[in-house]
Amino acid sequence: MKKAIYPGSFDPVTNGHLDIIERAAKIFDEVIVAVLHNDDKQHLFSTEERLRILRESLARLPNVSVKTFDGLLVNFAAECGTNLVIRGLRMVSDFDYEFQMTLTNRQLKSDLETVFLMTDAVYSFLSSSVVRQIAGYHGKIDHLVPPASAKALRERFV
């Protein structure tokens, strides 16, 4: 059974994230969407809110679960019993950062493998920070995020 982790902040989850998760769910037997909990980072949504939004958005995918973690990804992967990490790539600039993180993780856990999935071209510009900025100015976001994210963003930026 192949189990993989898709880690991130998901603040908020976007349609680009969903694209990666849905395709990963077709490749792996089990996908764990791992929400990073980091007290040092300023998030728009709390960890609990991000978990709720993700669970609502992913309920239709039976082989996908949502968990939270803090600390090192390599330790969380070991706790989950997997050595596979999924990362999404939008453009070349993402690759530079992801390549560095992959090499760092492999120094910490030599058998940890990272699988890169290219996002659909329609989402290549999309990031959570772009969505937060548009929502903050009450712009249209429904085509950028799942309904649970859109609802939470509208409530946050009333």
Image (cartoon, grey):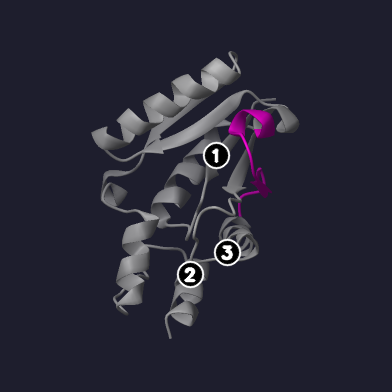
Residue underneath mark 1:
6
Q: Is residue 63 magenta?
A: yes
Amino acid type of the residue that numbered disc 2 sits on in the rendered structure: Pro
Residue underneath mark 2:
147
Q: Determine whether 3 is above or below 70 in the image.
A: above
How far, Cα to Cα, is label 2 from label 3? 9 Å
Is label 3 in contact with label 1 (beta carbons under 8 Å)? Answer: no
Q: Earlier in the sequence, mark 3 or mark 1?
A: 1
Which residue in the rendered view is the most extreme toward the front? 40
Amino acid type of the residue that numbered disc 1 sits on in the rendered structure: Tyr
Amino acid type of the residue that numbered disc 3 sits on in the rendered structure: Ile
Q: Residues within 10 Å of mark 3 (few under 14, many from 20)?
A: many
Q: Which residues are magenta?
A: 60-76
Q: Quadrant of the C terminus?
A: bottom left
Q: Quadrant of the N terminus?
A: top right
Q: Tag on residue 19?
A: none
Front residue of 88 and 101:
101
How far, Cα to Cα, is label 2 from label 1? 21 Å
Q: Does 132 sit left or right of 105 as displayed?
A: left
